[in-house]
Amino acid sequence: MKIKDKARTIIIEGLTLHLKGTPLKRINSFYNLNFKKYSLDQKDISFVNYLTSVCIRNRGVIEAVLNKYIKKKLPISGISAKAGIILGVAQILFSKVPPHAAVNSTVNLYVGDLQKWRKLANAVLRKILREEVYLKKIREDLSLTVPSWLYKDWQQQFGKKNTIKILKIYQQEPSLDIIVKNKIDLWQKKLNGVRLGKSTIRIKHKGKIENLKGYKEGHWWVQDIAAQIPVLLMGNIKNRNIFDLCAAPGGKTAQMLNAGALVTALDISKERVLQLSNNIKRIGLSKNLKLKVKDIMQYNPNSKADIVLLDAPCSGTGTFRKNPDVVWIKNKKSVIQNASKQKKLLLKALSFLKKNGFLIYSNCSLQYEEGENLINDLCEKKIIYIDKISRTELIDYPKEIFNKGLIRTLPYMYNNGMDGFFVARVKKVI
């Protein structure tokens, strides 16, 4: 088999995993093993990563096309066949591969276990080639970009105009935001980036982060501009005791340590705590850090904190620029389940606070159930009250992120790029 065909075969295997609900991070690990196994060069590796991204980012439109031409739902045994057809459609509609070459190269992959699906793949892809007007129309329908439940949610929450803005940004490859410990002007030049705020540099980068200047020496770490907000809202935190809950991988932990805080970081996963530890050691900020592998619900500290940060596990829909698969592996049910767990975690986290302390609750979900609705419910029950966030606290950020004392960032904001984030600063009702 030709190397390029081997690359496409790897993509089909990766898309099959995606259709089964496997997160993209695990698919990338699978890819890396196969890149070594078949000795693919950088050009072919880039081809695999690029087309996989194209397929997943445009899955909604591709699924709509397939629904027109495949009348019967394919059985579970046909999931790899569907993955192959998705690859073919993606190349026809969204890549620079010549359409007929896209069809031929895809159909030629239907050998072995896929042989029985060859005629179907060939028929579907050649029908698609003949429908230019229809395909142009459907390709421009942004409402198809994400699952219908998500589109409806966002329309209801943010309005149609803003939802369209969100969907447009979904089609773009995201930039990389980097926080530098100091000497931002120097690192802006070295990394050839754009400065954001006091300590962030935004760059365009597709390769390994580890290969960038200053990474090994620990001069900086990667953290989206939106994910920096929770710590910025803490004010002057030098020598203050902070509990960082659900802390891994540690971007916010690093932020707090770099500002002089005394941080106790907890995470339930031993593997993730090790990852956090290695990250903090790399950037040389371990001095004032205590690490614990703990389930928050079972944690009973000897002393209480001035500030508690709960960056709660969530659906992650706000990160879909970087994780385009997230909109397909989550659903409304999982969002509701997340909200229930988040409420329990928040109630427990409140018990860790000193009398006059405050809690920062945040997550990278765009769903109101995991943000505004949850906080408002606890306020109505008189368990917490909102310590309102003012415009003067985040002068480097756009005013549109402020919402009734809370923070709601959307992916199209801040120079066309930031994660969708929710942040609330709250205190206990005494």
Image (cartoon, helix red, strand yellow):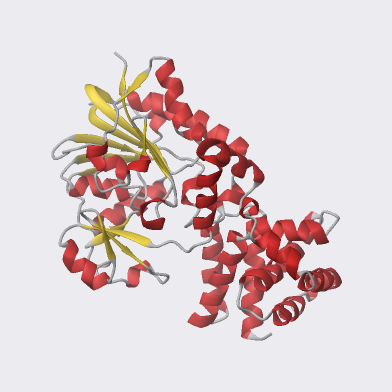
Residue 393 x, y percent position in the rendering: 23, 39
| Residue for point 21% across, 50% down | 286
- Whether residue 370 is visible: yes
- Whether residue 291 is visible: no
Above or below — where is 64 with respect to 4?
Answer: above
Above or below — where is 219 with respect to 340?
Answer: below
In the displayed structure image, the side of residue 208 where residue 335 appears, left or right: right
In the displayed structure image, the side of residue 364 where residue 286 appears, left or right: left
Above or below — where is 45 with respect to 137?
Answer: below
Above or below — where is 8 with respect to 28?
Answer: below
* The C terminus: image quadrant: top left
* The N terminus: image quadrant: bottom right
In the displayed structure image, the side of residue 29 where residue 312 appears, left or right: left
| Residue for point 60% across, 44% down | 151
| Residue for point 35% across, 48% down | 226
| Residue for point 66% across, 45% down | 148
Nearer to the camera, 131 or 12: 131
In the displayed structure image, the side of residue 172 where residue 97 appears, left or right: right
Give the quadrant of residue 179: bottom left
Residue 155 x, y percent position in the rendering: 57, 40
Residue 183 x, y percent position in the rendering: 15, 62
Nearer to the camera, 368 or 178: 368
